[in-house]
Image (cartoon, rainbow, N blue to C red):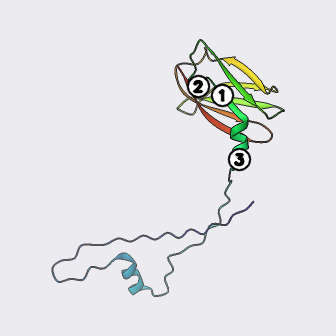
Amino acid sequence: MRITLLVFLIIQLAFPANAGEEVETVPQAIAHEASDFNTSTPMNLDLMLAFYASSVENSLKIFPNPVKRKDMLHITTTDTGSKKLSFYDITGKVVKILETNRTAFAFSVSDLDSGVYILNISTPNYQAAKKVIVQ
């Protein structure tokens, strides 16, 4: 899908006037100097839009969350096929990657420090990100 977005940038500055002077803004000054001045510039932007259907959210379960480091994190999904799970810390660094074809699986988080992580799950059908708290 290609979406064309027109962006118009309008900048307006006002300068203080001395007693008895008229306040003139930058657009007014430009209009006085160049009556054919056009402040709008059309731009074409390619946007990638992600639509997450409620069925995707309902088909993905992560529990327990928060999870204790000594416990296993369980994930279930109705999506069959390959899945890549990437854990990112709060700085955006990838700290753990798992790949599986199963619809229900569990794995240890004992190798992760306590903190907040973003779990990115990629499948051929969708991509989803969930916050996971490790205690």
Mark 1 and mark 3 lie on one chain; the one further toward the N terminus is 3
CA gap between label 2 and label 1 equals: 7 Å
Q: Which residue is nearer to you in this view: 59 or 29?
A: 59
Mark 3 and mark 2 lie on one chain; the one further toward the N terminus is 3
| Residue type, label 2 | Asn
Residue topped by disc 1:
62
Helix, strand or loop at label 2? It is: loop
Q: Which residue is nearer to you in this view: 21 or 105?
A: 105
x and y percentages locating residue 51 in the rendered image:
69, 50
In the image, taking residue 113 as reference, residue 49 lies left or right, namely right
| Residue type, label 3 | Ala
Q: In the figure, 121 relative to 40: above or below? A: above
In the image, taking residue 95 as reference, residue 16 lies left or right, namely left
Discs 3, 2 touching: Cβ within 8 Å: no
Residue under the image location 75 percent in, 59 percent down: 1
Examine the image and state in which quarter residue 42 appears: bottom right
Dot label at residue 54:
none
The crowd level at tag 1 (other Cα within 10 Å; few <14, some 14-19, many 20+) is some
Q: In the figure, 71 relative to 96: above or below? A: above
Residue topped by disc 3:
53
Helix, strand or loop at label 3? It is: loop
